[in-house]
């Protein structure tokens, strides 16, 4: 994954600061992300979802709405409709510089904004909402005790998430005029709705209203246990992984992906330049991260090199046992392989030819579920040692290294 930072003009000519998270290869599609009310492009949920989607081949543009973060303009001059205008401006920028967004993703009030903006972005095929209100006016509940003052004086400073913001009467008038459920009924795009049943800020009844108003294709995913802002990294990554899988039903596969599939057996590892050690590993259409733990100076965003080695041996072991058991019609229900790696003194290894220095030891614990007799279990453990990766690791290996031009 790589990121590009730039700005683009909104409808008033003010510069909006943006980040485009890109996959290392050609993007399957481009997505536009609308952050939650008063949040910003760099809030944890937006950043984690965008970065994870990039690993799935989806480029994501996230930006600060007018008057927020690094973007120009005054927040007091903005309202829900201006946020929608900013989304359209971002889509125009993508269309002119890269590719128009096929996917709109919105979090909280940003979810309502993408629902309202979809009809103005013709290339949009999929819309995703996360903890979105069914009525934009729901956001006024954050400062409901000051609504009367805003109506009376025209403008009042309120504190939201510990920060002061100025809210004007025009903001109240604008959200009151929105007819979002009518927009949802006329969406004509595939819709995916995420919401937590324990969301204390925007109740799950909002998801029910959006879902009821929408026409098919529409899907709902419950984020049980998640908070409104998706503060837990695993919740944000889960959302991104589900989005990536869901998009597979509605997005065309780029020609480059078909080419990648023909290169089976070729593994490419490339630095992402995010953190000290993070690498993107790609094999055909598959992409994932390799990294080191935080204690080693990494980001802990993926398994380390030795963990990947153990995973390879474990997967090969399990697959080999499955093939053998099915061929012999053994009642093997499930295989679990647990592996550990350590460095030991050669003199502590009874079966090793090397008797000096330090050697590698891998312990492999195989759990076999099923009504297997002792003879079958013994034979399966013997077969485990015959898996191809096991043979590779215990045989002489010729590794050749060449320099290749970028």
Image: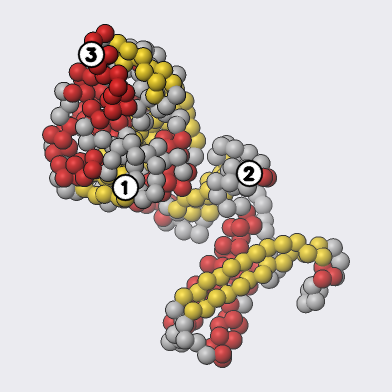
Q: Work out how far the residue at label 1 is from the one at label 3, CA to CA, in angstroms.
A: 33 Å
Res 305 quadrant in image: bottom right
Q: Nearer the viewer, mark 3 or mark 2?
A: 3
Residue at label 3? Answer: 151
Q: Which mark is residue 197?
A: 1
- In the picture provided, is 220 more to the left or to the right than 278? left
Q: Residue at x 57, y 53 (%)?
A: 303
Quarter residue 174 falls in:
top left
**Residue 360, image x and y in percent?**
73, 64
Secondary structure type for disc 3: helix
Tag 3–tag 2 contact (CB < 8 Å)? no
Residue for point 27% across, 13% down: 149
Residue position marked by numbered label 2 in the rendering:
294
Residue 108 appearing in the image: yes
For residue 83, above or below residue 349 = above
Q: CA distance from mark 1 to mark 2?
A: 33 Å
Q: Which callout, 3 or 2, points at the residue further toward the start of the chain?
A: 3
Of 210 and 72, the residue lying toward us: 210
Count the labels in the image.
3
How far from the left and from the top, in percent, is residue 66? 35, 18
Q: Crowding near pointer 2: few (<14 within 10 Å), some, many (20+)?
A: few
């Amino acid at each position: 994954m790589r990121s590009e930072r730039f700005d683009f003009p909104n409808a008033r000519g003010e510069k909006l600061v943006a980040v485009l998270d890109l996959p290392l290869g050609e993007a399957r599609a481009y997505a536009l992300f609308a952050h939650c009310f008063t949040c910003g492009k760099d809030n944890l949920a937006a950043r984690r979802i965008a970065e994870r989607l990039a690993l799935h081949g989806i480029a994501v543009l996230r930006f600060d709405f007018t008057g927020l973060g690094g973007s120009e303009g005054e927040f007091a001059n903005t309202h829900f409709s201006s946020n929608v205008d900013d989304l359209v401006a971002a889509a125009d920028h993508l269309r002119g510089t890269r590719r128009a967004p096929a996917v709109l993703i919105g979090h909280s009030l940003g979810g309502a904004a993408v629902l309202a903006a979809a009809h103005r972005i013709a290339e949009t095929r999929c819309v995703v909402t996360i903890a979105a209100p069914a009525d934009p006016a729901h956001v006024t509940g954050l400062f409901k005790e000051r609504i009367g003052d805003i109506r009376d004086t025209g403008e009042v400073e309120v504190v939201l998430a510990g920060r002061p913001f100025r809210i004007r009467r025009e903001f109240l008038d604008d959200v009151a005029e929105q007819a979002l459920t009518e927009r949802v009924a006329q969406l004509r795009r595939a819709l995916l709705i995420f919401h937590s049943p324990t969301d204390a800020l925007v109740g799950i009844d909002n998801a029910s209203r959006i879902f009821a108003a929408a026409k098919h294709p529409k899907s709902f995913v419950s984020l049980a246990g998640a908070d409104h802002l998706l503060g837990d990294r695993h919740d944000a990554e889960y959302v991104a992984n589900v989005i990536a899988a869901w998009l597979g039903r509605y997005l065309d596969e780029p020609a480059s992906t078909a080419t990648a599939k023909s290169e089976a057996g070729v593994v490419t590892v490339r630095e992402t330049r995010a953190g000290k050690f993070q690498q993107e590993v790609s094999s055909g259409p598959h992409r994932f991260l390799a990294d080191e733990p935080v204690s080693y100076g990494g980001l802990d965003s993926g398994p380390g090199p030795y963990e990947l080695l153990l995973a390879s041996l474990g997967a090969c072991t399990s697959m080999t046992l499955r093939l053998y058991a099915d061929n012999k019609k053994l009642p093997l229900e499930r295989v679990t392989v647990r592996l550990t790696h350590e460095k030991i003194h050669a003199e502590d290894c009874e079966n090793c030819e090397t008797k000096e220095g330090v050697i590698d030891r891998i312990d492999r614990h195989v759990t076999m579920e099923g009504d297997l007799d002792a003879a079958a279990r013994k034979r399966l453990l013997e077969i485990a040692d015959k898996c191809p990766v096991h043979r590779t690791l215990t045989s002489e290996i010729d590794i050749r290294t060449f320099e290749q031009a970028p």
